[in-house]
Image (spheres, helix red, strand yellow):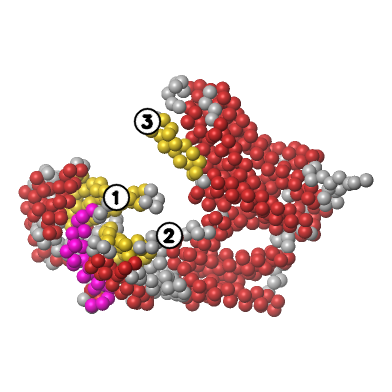
Amino acid sequence: MLSKRSFFNKALFGKHLSRFWPLWGIVSLVGAMFPLYVQLTLMQQTPGVVDMKSVFREGLYQIAAGFVPAFTCVYAIFCVMAVWGYLYNARSVGLMHTLPVDRTCLFVTNTLAAMAMQLIPYAITGGLLCLIALGWGFFDVIGVVNTILTVLFCTLLFTGIATLCAMLTGHAFVLPVFYLLANILAFTMEILITNLAHEFLLGVPMMEDIGRLTFLSPVVEIYKDFEIDIEWVDGVLVVCRLQGLWVVALYALAGLGLLALGWFLYRRRHSESAGDVVAFRWLRPVFRYGVALLSGLTIGRLLYELLWGEIFQKGDYAEVLPMAVCIFLAGLIGYYAASMLLEKSRRVFGKKSLPGVGVVAAGTVALCLLVSVDVFGLVRKVPALDEIETVTISDDGDYSTWSASEDPEQVKALLDFHQAIVDDRDYIRSLAYDWAWSSDACRHHVVLEYQLTDGTTLRRTYGLWLTRDRVETAGTYDHLLAEFYKDPAVRLSDVTVPKGARLEDIDIFCNYADGSYINANEHSEDQQICEALQKDVIEGNIPAKSVLDYPYESSRFYLRIWYQVYNEAYDVYHNYEKTVCMTPAMTNTLNVLMELGYLTEKDVESWSRDLAERAAEDEAEMYEGVIYPETSTVYAG
């Protein structure tokens, strides 16, 4: 007689649902409040005011893309912990594994029960919403189907992750920790390692490129790629669709793969592993050294900042040897802490642990060398002139763009400036100045961004101290930047909105007028003021920018030009500003401001008299006739 093998146990499935009804029952009750709220809102609304079918679809998509992934991620671990809770108690696991039900049947039944507890609240809430939509006549099939698919895909994904984590541990309190790490570990490690490298690599803005490993962190990647595309025109919903649903579908397939892996591990899991931090011996080294690595990257960084960075570090960049020592000490803390958890004992300090200590030491050396040594030449990379399409320089908020085809001389000057920074990298790393203002030193935040002919972008960010001695020394980056600002084309760019940018506004700050702050609201007036500024530059009325002065700290009469630059990559406009300090020689600009009624001759006379008095006190010579960009908010007075 052939034996019949069962893959599903109805009694056990029902037992799970009845035993854990408060879990899914309370969530269902809370979810049912939302359809009730919608019904009450509809009863108070004037019929025919809006297209309710479009509003219904948009609302479903807002729930699908905004609420469902996060809620399912959190709720799934509770449901999985409920059905697999017997694995973490020796008596319970022994009882379950002596029942006349094989492990495959147990796995399938428990997994379906966990998914059912997740789907019941969605079914109740969604069913009530659909009934309301049908009753009011705005039911949308496409919106409902896409929302259901989102719920199913997210349920498969997070059930698969949680179930695999449940198989890897024998301790109930460790399961949620493993589950959290499974969802964010890759993204977190990328941030930690990139941040560490950023402490060593001069000018390389690595923190801006984080996201290469987000596909290994499902929640982060879903919220990055899964979104709603909505467009309303005259109160009519023209476009409303879910973008990136295929991403969630791929993760659902990954969830099925994780469930299969969980089933494979469950069949080979020993019942005696109940109570252990990890359920498999081959996983013990991974856990031990993984905790050591996380400890080194977190506690180690904290130790460095507390014990060395704030006290002994010179300059803005970390020192390799002290950082390695701190990471090693923190790694040892993590290593021995993990060993205590695995052995369930504090007696882990002995000769047997020395090989592990050696591995932590070797890992620390490898990690510090990897992030501190410019193995791939990122710090030293300066593009060739024929590789550049455009180069942008932003100096403390000032934004200027130079094209290799239109301004090859300016592009070459910026390349020389960039190369000088690279050549002086050791000097920059070791340099430390007091942040207090000095007439002999000034700090600049410079960003160089190259659009290359092969379609790629190269971006470098530098915090540079410029000193008076080096400004007068040929070949230094201080001297090259000062010479760059003396170029007439560069001086003109200081008062000109970059090509492709959009002029937004011009603010006038003057202590000598009736009000210290005046806003030029008329766009035509903004254009007049810009044209007058450009005319003053052409006539030589505005001297070159000084790289050693902070004029806005003392100037009592200046203009601030606001403009926007479109970023195609993110489909947004970025705001920029230029600050122009006024001088009596800028006759064209002064005449326009008086013609527009922002100033009177009396105001100009008061201003000129004050400048003369300040010059007599030897203060104005550091600020007079300087155009300098700045990003902080400044008020006259």
Mark 1 neighbour class, 10 Å CA radius: few under 14, some 14 to 19, many 20 or more: some
Image vertical order of residue 15 relative to residue 51, above or below = below
Tell me where residue 219 appears, x and y as whole percent: 55, 50
Mark 3, residue position: 234
On-image quarter of the N terminus: top right
Element carrying mark 3? loop
For the point 27% across and 51% down, the residue is: 501
Rounded to the nearest angstrom, the CA distance separating label 3 from label 2 is: 38 Å
**Where, by quadrant of the figure, is residue 609 drawn?**
bottom left
Instruction: Say which quarter of the image contains residue 611.
Output: bottom left
Q: Which residues are magenta?
A: 474-497
User: Mark on residue 208?
Assistant: 2
**Distance (Cα) linking label 2 and label 1:** 21 Å
**Which residue lies at the image location 52% right of the left edge and 26% below the top edge?**
138
Q: Amino acid at mark 3?
A: Asp
Hey, what amino acid is under mark 1?
Gln
Q: Characterize the local packing of mark 3: few (<14), some (14-19) or many (20 or more) Cα atoms within 10 angstroms.
A: few
Query: Mark 2 or mark 1: which comes first in sequence?
Result: 2
The span from disc 3 to disc 1 (Cα, nearest Å) is 27 Å
